[in-house]
Amino acid sequence: MTDDFEAMWADLAPLGRSASTGGYFRQPWHAAEREARAWFAEQAAARGLRLVTDAVGNQVAWWDVPGGSSGRPGDAVLTGSHLDSVLDGGAFDGPLGVVSALAAVDRLRERGVAPTRPLGVSVFVEEEGSRFGLACLGSRLATGEVALEDALARRDRDGTSLEDALAAADLGGGSRDGQAVPGLLDLSGVGCFVELHVEQGRHLVDTDAAVGLASRIWPHGRYRFDVTGRADHAGATRMEDRHDPLLTFSMTALAANKQARLAGQRATFGRLDVAPNATNAIPSRVTGWLDARADSDEALAALVEAITAQAAARAERDGTALSVTPESVSQAVAFDADLTARLGRVGARTGTGAGSGGWPVLPSLAGHDAGILAAAGVPTAMMFVRNPTGVSHAPDERAETADCLTGVEALADVLAELVS
Ligand code: GLV
Ligand code: MN
Ligand code: MN
């Protein structure tokens, strides 16, 4: 039965979709993302899975073992992804892993698999960090990497605190939301996590493979660059008398691009805030957020340092003031070698990889909840499904249904082995 995947996909398709761009706006705890999580609760109920929702809205739908779990720590197998999106994001980043996990549960049941380990399908909130600025907030909270008390005061662009956003989202376990737990998810029973995700680059297209595996995640971080200058009249102020923070920022953006190219790494300013943002006034302040990624922790630090040094030199020339604040930094993560090798053997056996079988193994230049669980000591692996455009975090993100269904079968093969 392949229509379960397509029916789920059709349910999710309109939620948070912009009519003008075709992209998705599913910011955490806002309406579209809450609808998506309510949809997940309905899917869990329809399958008779036991849904647990924690205090921030992380969800796990459990397929319990008859007679109860062995109770051994680390007994459970977890798979899933996220349902939130970046601003104007693609359809697949996150939802593909959730829908594929539910469809894989259906495949296992069709195959008559009787799990001897509990199997959970997870949805972690605020994976993209698009609202409160900290990537993978839900999984960082659930693993204890970030304390809830520290996170509650974070504010979104409108000044709403996380505490108020959670209160407004009413996560208290409504009738559709199953069992609400007072604190955060307890992941101590989780023995391994497998996240299926759309590929966010071109490796699988270029190697002609429908499915791949991740070896590691590049270290990455977000850094806020605040540049303050002196507001003044756009006409009456002589060019040589200005202290224009936008000039300092503009040079910083060019420096980021140059330094990343020179080092073979990645640097992007994708978000900018200019005050007061008036056409006929020199700005008083510019804030830009740098997203930097590199192939080692040392290379990431060196990249950010080089960009900061160029920005500081330019600030001195412009008579502006610069401050740089790291907001969300994730160190390099290697996925579990044994688990990844085990998945690779499934790929070789089932022949759903490139050509004669075997799934290509590639690094991820995007962050994932899988990286947070891996860093917390949970044996973790990731599977990628080919993306024909190679585009991600944008409306042009794609995956062909045939490849998605190959991914579902591949995930079901992996889970069948892990839960048996
Ligand atoms: C998450 O998708 C990221 O920005 O790496
Ligand atoms: Mn994602
Ligand atoms: Mn993403």
Image (cartoon, rainbow, N blue to C red):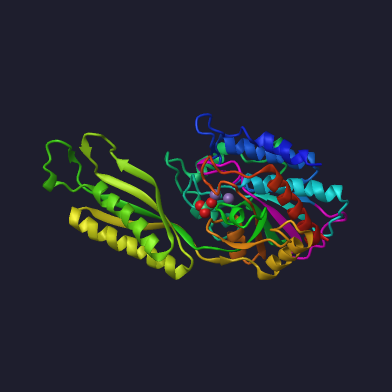
In this orientation, which residue lies closer to the viewer: 227 or 397? 397
Query: Which of the image's four quarters has the C terminus?
Result: bottom right
In this orientation, which residue lies closer to the viewer: 242 or 145? 242
Give the residue displayed 56% in from the left and 33% down from the top. 17
Main SS, magenta residues: loop
- Which residue extends farthest top? 19
Residue 317 as seen in the image, left or right of residue 166? left
Residue 415 as seen in the image, left or right of residue 378? right
Residue 274 as seen in the image, left or right of residue 176? left
Q: Please say if 177 is above or below 385.
A: above
Give the residue displayed 23% in from the left and 60% down from the top. 313
Residue 268 in view here: yes
Give the magenta range.
64-93
Give the mark count: 0
- The verdict on residue 70 being magenta is yes
Q: Please say if 397 is above or below 190.
A: above
Residue 135 in view here: no
Give the residue displayed 75% in from the left and 63% down from the top. 348
Where residue 227 appears, as percent x and y from the top left, is: 28, 51
